[in-house]
Structures are given as C-alpha cells and as structure tokens.
Amino acid sequence: MSVEQATSIIVHDNPYVTVFPYPEKGIGILPELCCNRVILFFNKNHRVAGVPSVG
C-alpha cells in the first residue's frame, strides 16, 4: 500500500490524528509518546514498510 493511501485511511478512521511518514525505521523519531500522532514507516518505493504505530 502506498503512503498516500495509508495516510488517507488513517485520517478517515480518526480525523484527530496527524500522520508522520518516516523514510527509515528508527530515523528521527522523538522519544515522547503522543497519542494524536501516528508514525508511518515507508521504504524507498514509498510503500508502507510496517504497521503504523501511535507515537
């Protein structure tokens, strides 16, 4: 699934969250937990690379 499709689904399910796509797992992630933020990792082809997580 593409990043755009995943973002659209997440925001449709919960319009109160913000999706933060990251190009590599573990790069640039803040250590704080924020319940209205969804972390979405993607690969070089802009395909979702894992299960989105709250963070």
Image (cartoon, helix red, strand yellow):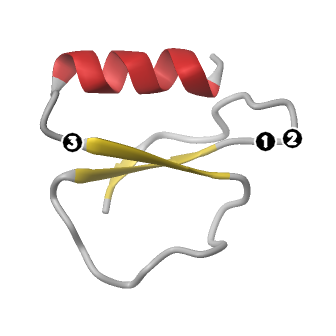
- Residue type indicated by callout 1: Asn
Q: Quadrant of the C terminus?
A: bottom left
Q: Which residue is mark 3?
A: 17
Q: Quadrant of the N terminus?
A: top right
Q: Which residue is mark 2?
A: 44
Left or right: 54, with 46 as reference point: left
- Alpha-carbon neighbours of circle 2 within 10 Å: few (<14), some, or many (≥20)? few
- Residue type indicated by callout 3: Val
> Whole-percent x and y of residue 24?
72, 59
Name which quarter of the figure residue 17 lies in: top left
Secondary structure found at label 2: loop
Q: Which residue is mark 1?
A: 43
> Whole-percent x and y of residue 4?
56, 21
Secondary structure found at label 1: loop
Distance between mark 2 and mark 3 Cα atoms? 25 Å
Q: Residue at x 44, y 27 (%)?
A: 7
Against 14, is 33 above or below?
Answer: below
> Whole-percent x and y of residue 34?
20, 67
User: Which mark lies nearer to you, 1 or 3?
Assistant: 3
Give whichever of discs 2 and 3 has the lower sequence position: 3
Secondary structure found at label 3: loop
- Residue type indicated by callout 2: Lys
Left or right: 30, with 25 as reference point: left
Distance between mark 2 and mark 1 Cα atoms? 4 Å
Mark 2 and mark 1 residues within 8 Å of each other at the beta carbon: yes
Left or right: 40, with 53 as reference point: right
Mark 2 and mark 3 residues within 8 Å of each other at the beta carbon: no
- Alpha-carbon neighbours of circle 3 within 10 Å: few (<14), some, or many (≥20)? some
Against 43, is 55 above or below?
Answer: below
Q: Residue at x 38, y 84 (%)?
A: 31
